[in-house]
Image (spheres, grey):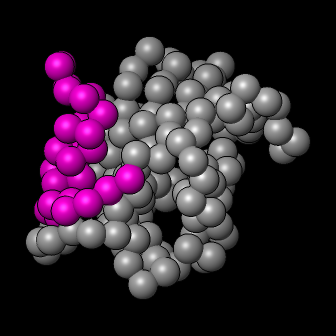
Amino acid sequence: MRNTTLCHIEKDGKYLMLHRIKKENDLNQDKWVGIGGKFEDKESPEECNLREVYEETGLRLLNYRYCGIVTFVSDKWETEYMHIFHSDSYEGEIKECDEGVLEWIDKQELLKLPIWEGDKIFLRLMDNNAPFFSLKLQYEGDTLIKAILDGKEMNI
């Protein structure tokens, strides 16, 4: 299993998204995802979030909200614990990312792009300022087959 972070940086009703098109053997190939990556040894979720955002975008977060944790279970990939963050306060200039193309995407348009089905659930929770949540998403291949929010199975 692995621990990762994912941050959705917001400005003017848009999220800074990463279109994952540059890495080989990428489980997120061709998908639009937030900014994040794997924990390094001894990092806290907050430290990983700040480092990954800076490495992938060149931006330094001035403020952020730790929104929840998502447990991804898959028949193809190892289990992943993703710590979800949101920020609308940052400084710096966006740089080119070696994992894909960074682009500001309108939050409503984002739902029409190739994103993981489960991402729509936690994006909605973030947009509604839900309290800290635990979301378990179970996939078979690229298909979401089960979602459990705070211990209760959801209709998907």
Q: Which residues are magenta?
A: 39-65
Query: Of residues 126 and 51, which is closer to you in this image?
Result: 126
Q: Is residue 84 above or below residue 97?
A: above
Q: What's the residue at 29%, 51% (across, down)?
A: 99
Q: What's the residue at 26%, 60% (across, down)?
A: 63
Decide if residue 24 is in sight here. no
Decide if residue 82 is in sight here. yes
Residue 18, image x, y percentages: 38, 60
Query: Of residues 78 and 36, which is closer to you in this image?
Result: 36
- The N terminus lies in which quarter of the figure? top left
Residue 10, image x, y percentages: 40, 71
Residue 5, image x, y percentages: 36, 39
Query: Of residues 12 and 113, which is closer to you in this image?
Result: 12
Image position of 115 (left or right of 17): right
Image position of 95 (left or right of 132): left
Q: What's the residue at 42%, 37% (across, down)?
A: 83
